Image (spheres, grey):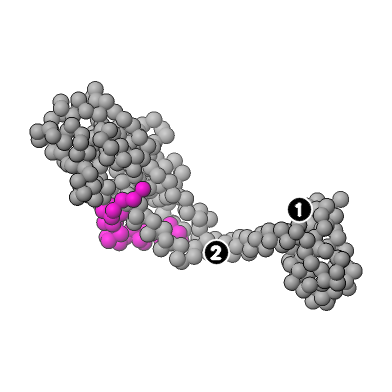
Amino acid sequence: MLRDRDVLTPDTLALLQLVADSGSFAAAARQLGLVPSALTYRIRQVEDALDVLLFDRSARQARPTEAGQELLREGARLLSEVDAVANRVRRVATGWEPELRIAVDGVISRTTLLELIEAFYTIAPPTRLKITDSILAGTLEALSSGRADLAIGIAVDASHVAGLQQLDLGEITFRYVVAPHHRLADELQPISDEVLRQHRIIAVADSSRSGNGQTIGVINGQDVLTVDTMQAKLQAQLRGIGGGFLPDNMTMPYLRSGQLVERELMRPPRKIKLRYAWRGTNPGKALQWWLDQLQSEATRTSLLSNHYVG
């Protein structure tokens, strides 16, 4: 007995659609150069395999039953996907990667990132994008471990990792900010580490899986609330749950509106140089497109300064 997958071939799905469009088995048979009985036999094979009636034969016209209509709908979708796969394979054969994985640090502007993604899709590439959020050492680790092909916003030197290429992205300033109702908002400035130690800090967990993650800005003995994203850190600080360092591209709108206030510390300001890096020396067309965009100073600046959205 024929199985479902034996009868639901692209040719059969196209045949069923032709019968529905023609309105009768005889008309469809004429278009195919078949005798009506041969076409009817093929339709019956499909119905027997599925154990359903696909066409109502009570009238002179061949009208799809409810089950037949569902099969035609799904068949059209499957045929479209088959065509898309074929086109994708042809495009991949010309140098496009099937998938491009990009690890993006939490300090990178999501507004600009989404603008780049939109621009990438306008060229109708066959490459699927996979974007993952990373924090601190986890951004480099995603690349060096093979989980990403491109990393944007690496805060550590990647020159020691074999097979990686890296270029400067730019510098970003971190400000120590608190909500206006936080006790540190009324503290005399500059604020010492001893005073900071008495107040909770909001920290973002390093996304590294190796156990060698970094912790930045935490003082020994200080209470810490650890969250997993920069957006969660921002929200916690807006609520006054704690203080901490946040990048300019996240804080400026809230500093201007008064929802956050900056505090001057006795320790020096925090400025971090960021880089982007990729694997290999012969990038595919999708990766090369992204590298070409990152060569633009305006793009790099926007990634580090454009208004952050979660």
Q: Position of residue 139 (x, y in %)?
A: 37, 43
The type of residue carrying mark 2 is: Arg
Secondary structure beneath dot 2 equals helix
State the residue in front, 136 or 236: 236
Residue pictured at 74% horizontal, 67% vertical: 17
Residue 98 appears in view: yes
Quarter holding residue 40: bottom right
Residue 34's label in the rendered image is none
For disc 2, the neighbor class at 10 Å (few under 14, some 14 to 19, many from 20) is: some
Q: Nearer the viewer, mark 2 or mark 1?
A: 1
Q: Which residue is farthest top?
A: 221
- The residue segment tinted magenta is 285-310
Is the residue 99 above or below the residue 25 in the image?
above
For disc 1, the neighbor class at 10 Å (few under 14, some 14 to 19, many from 20) is: few
Q: Is residue 101 left or right of residue 38?
A: left
Residue ID for mark 2: 91
Residue 82 appears in view: no
Residue ID for mark 1: 5
The type of residue carrying mark 1 is: Arg
State the residue in front, 273 or 77: 77
Residue pictured at 85% horizontal, 55% vertical: 48
State the residue in front, 111 or 293: 111
Residue pictured at 46% horizontal, 62% vertical: 121
Separation of residues labelled 2 and 1 (CA atoms): 28 Å
- Quick check: is 307 in the magenta stretch? yes
